[in-house]
Amino acid sequence: MGIKSNLTRNISLYALGFALALPLQAGALDFTPDPSRVLTDPSYLPMQGQVYGSTEYSFQRTEWDTDDNLGVQTKSNTNTASVIDQELEYGVTNDFTLRLTDSYEWLKANVSEPFSPSTDTHSYGFTDPSFGATWRVLDQQRFPFSWDLIGDYAPNLIDAKSASTEEDGTVARGGWTGTLGTALSYKTRDFTMYGDALATYQGNRKTFNETTHDSVTYDSSWEYQLALNTQTRLTDLFSVNLGVTQTFNNNDDANQVTTSGHTLDFTYEPGDTTDFNVALNYQLIPNTLAGALIYVHSFYDNDTSSVYSTSTKSNTTLKNESTDTFGAKLYYAFN
């Protein structure tokens, strides 16, 4: 799996580098500054009184290996998920937008262990909705570039229940999150560059297993994200989006409470994540209705570990993790 992951990563890096260099090499593209707003563009905001939305279906496949405290591989894991993402935005003014997003997910988790039959568990349901706003402090119509301030809040409305072979689970996080960020963008007639930086505070979260009645509580932590996304408009109807996102995760202190009342303290150490994305867009009705085919490959650069302070035999490490996501998305905007 490691060789496959490295090969996919190298292909993705070469493809991204070529795609980002393409606009600089293509003499036919027009790089005249153009502050107009194009549906599917990463810097797009709805105008005052306009409603913008997107609906996406995606299929995700995640694979990884699990090692025990001695570094011996004990499991091979495969998660497959079907996800529907919905986003709605409203332009309060030309430069201030309110946002609502949510997702519904069907997740199947497969675990294979040596000398044992593989097992499947299932989780499904809504994630917690997210409420947000974007304020375009500087607009390229009057300045050399656009500058946005971004905020989102997702309350803890849905309980997080881990799945077992006897009980289905939920896909909610089990805690609230809050995000603040900023973005800079520059748009020409045929090319857009959009970079953003986000900081997300993840409040305490708790998961509960209805079969074993064990619960796990995670302390709050911070997550940071840097992203660069581009769009190259090949014609008035066709465009290509390309981008890379780097997510930096901090460790979480956690504790597991068993049915006997025994508490096990441990530290959850998630690895950082790198996502490469590409999308082919087509304007079905220019700036009113558009469709896109999307592919994302996610690399989990560092090992993800659960380190127990008093029960080292319970330590586990996740290795060789990667995710492939295939999606189809519909964009729409109307007054």
Image (cartoon, rainbow, N blue to C red):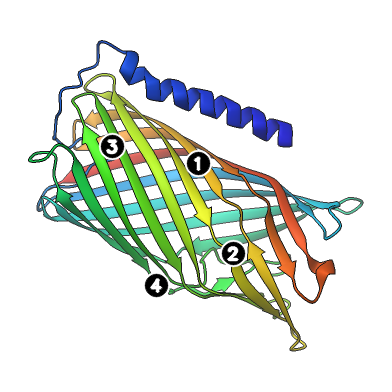
* Marks 2 and 3, the one that precedes in the sequence: 3
* 107 vs 326: above or below: below
Label 4 to label 1: alpha-carbon separation: 26 Å
Neighbours of disc 4 within 10 Å: few (<14), some (14-19), many (20+): some
Q: Check disc 2 and report its element: helix, strand or loop.
A: loop
Q: Is residue 8 toward the left or the right of residue 335 in the image?
A: right
> What residue is pinned by disc 2?
251
Label 4 to label 3: alpha-carbon separation: 28 Å
Neighbours of disc 2 within 10 Å: few (<14), some (14-19), many (20+): some
* 85 vs 170: above or below: above
Q: Is residue 135 toward the left or the right of residue 305 in the image?
A: left
Residue 63 place in picture, x, y as percent: 67, 45
> What residue is pinned by disc 1?
275
Kindly tell me whether residue 214 is visible in this rendering. no
* Marks 1 and 3, the one that precedes in the sequence: 3
> What residue is pinned by disc 3?
40
Mark 1: which amino acid?
Asp
> Quadrant location of residue 313?
bottom right
Kindly tell me whether residue 61 is visible in this rendering. yes
> What residue is pinned by disc 4?
155
Label 2 to label 1: alpha-carbon separation: 20 Å
* Marks 4 and 2, the one that precedes in the sequence: 4
Label 4 to label 2: alpha-carbon separation: 22 Å
